[in-house]
Amino acid sequence: MQFLKFLFILFFSFITTNNAEAKVKKNPAQIAKKKESKEKNILEPYGVEVNSTHALLVDHQTGKILLEKNANQSFEPASMTKIMTAYMVMKALKEGRIKPESLVTISSNARSIEKGSSDMFLEIGDQVSVQDLLMGLIIVSGNDAAIALAEYLSGTQSAFASDMNYVAKELGCSQTEFKNASGLPEEGHLTTAHDLIIMSQKTLEDFPEWYSIHKELKFKYRNIEQPNRNLLLNKNIGCDGVKTGFASKPGYGMVASAVQNGRRLFLVVTGLHTMKERADEAYRLLQWGFGTFGNYTIMPEGKSILEIPVRYGSQEMVEIIADQHLLTLHRNRIHQIKAAIKYRTVLESPFKAGTQVGEVILTHPDWQEKVIIPLVAKKDISRASFLSRIGQTLKYLFQKDS
């Protein structure tokens, strides 16, 4: 293996105290405490202030985590539970087990929700379509709609919660345990910011035709019109989802997603004190994500990086290309990336296009792990004929002697 270092900047040729003493002295312990409290909200290495108790910001296209704070620490999801509830309904719709126009009879369980909680205002015995219930679930966060849909799909809420947990684990949500469909407080009903991002991303990817419900600004049922609780939908940030939540213990939280210039970010925040603080925090962090980072084509697709000699092949050289080419990078710290390329000096035929022959290794002071980009052969190379192989051997011997 040959190891050749080169500057990362080459890749980008391819891409379009002294203070006056205070008159009134303060208690030093109080000053230190205040400073420590403030510093706890600053996340390194970028110095961004995060007031949420738990937060996670992810670039959807590359999977790059832009910031995280207690992202794998469990908390009560409250109505953010309904992301998974909605996923289960959309899954049943896609599989043809239910239809949008299918009617659901509202039970006393659905009506006996906690007074003052988010409500679609269903009444016992109502015949309501699955589509209306899904819209009430997502747009106005109806706890009654969540229970009605759970009972319709699985018979009981407990059975539905079991189904939710099974599917969530299949999606990769390894730290989630649901006890109900609505997110109303219940012992052991927990998730993480990481898992909420997964649920939201899979909803977008698996059911794009239903995901669009999340950006509806209002919903009317029984002549009662209610607004979407996601205040970001009214801000000029490109937000089109996903779900808000509130409970006394975790406070105000939300999963938000926004698109700017074709680039999508997903965000989780929780532990805020008011709806406004929640919206302001989410807005600020999304704007920070869009403004601070960009997606860069490091290696144009199909662009030849080098050529490697082929031994006993149908041709003497083969072009090498990068198998991966898009990275999310801090706009002001691109120059700090270091790169190295490692590859085999000679390839033995035959081999197929896509055969890995080396790798580009990227490092950056801000990264905990290296980024590895595989290098692969651009085309198939077959074995040369017997006479051709003899000729290549003689040519090699003469070159060696000379």
Image (cartoon, rainbow, N blue to C red):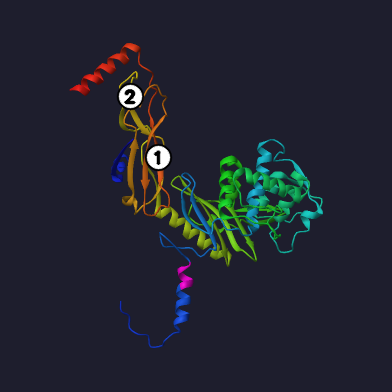
Question: Gap in Å between the C-alphas at discs 1 and 2?
Answer: 22 Å
Of mark 1 and mark 2, the one earlier in the sequence is 2
> What residue do we see at 31% from left, 42% from top?
11
Q: Residues within 10 Å of mark 1 (few under 14, many from 20)?
A: some
Badge 2: residue crowd in 10 Å (few <14, some 14–19, many ≥20): many
- Specify whether 304 is left or right of 192: left
Nearer to us in this view, 178 or 245: 178
Determine if residue 329 is in view: yes
User: Which mark lies nearer to you, 1 or 2?
Assistant: 2
Where's residue 35, x and y in %?
45, 74
Residue where numbered disc 1 is placed = 373
Left/right of residue 50 with respect to residue 129 in the rendered view? left
Q: Is residue 335 above or below residue 276?
A: above
Residue 310: give its label: 2
Magenta residues, start to end: 36-40
Which residue occupies the extreme front position in the image?
A: 401
Q: Residue at x 32, y 11 (%)?
A: 387
List x then y, in percent, for residue 40.
Answer: 48, 67
Q: Is residue 37 magenta?
A: yes
Q: Picture coordinates of residue 98 (x, y %)?
A: 72, 39
Residue at x 30%, y 22% (from the top left corner): 316
Label number found at residue 96: none
Whether residue 241 sits left or right of residue 141 in the image: it is left
In-front residue for pair 361/120: 361
Name the foreground residue: 129 vs 320. 320
Q: Secondary structure at mark 2?
A: strand
Q: Amino acid at mark 2?
A: Val
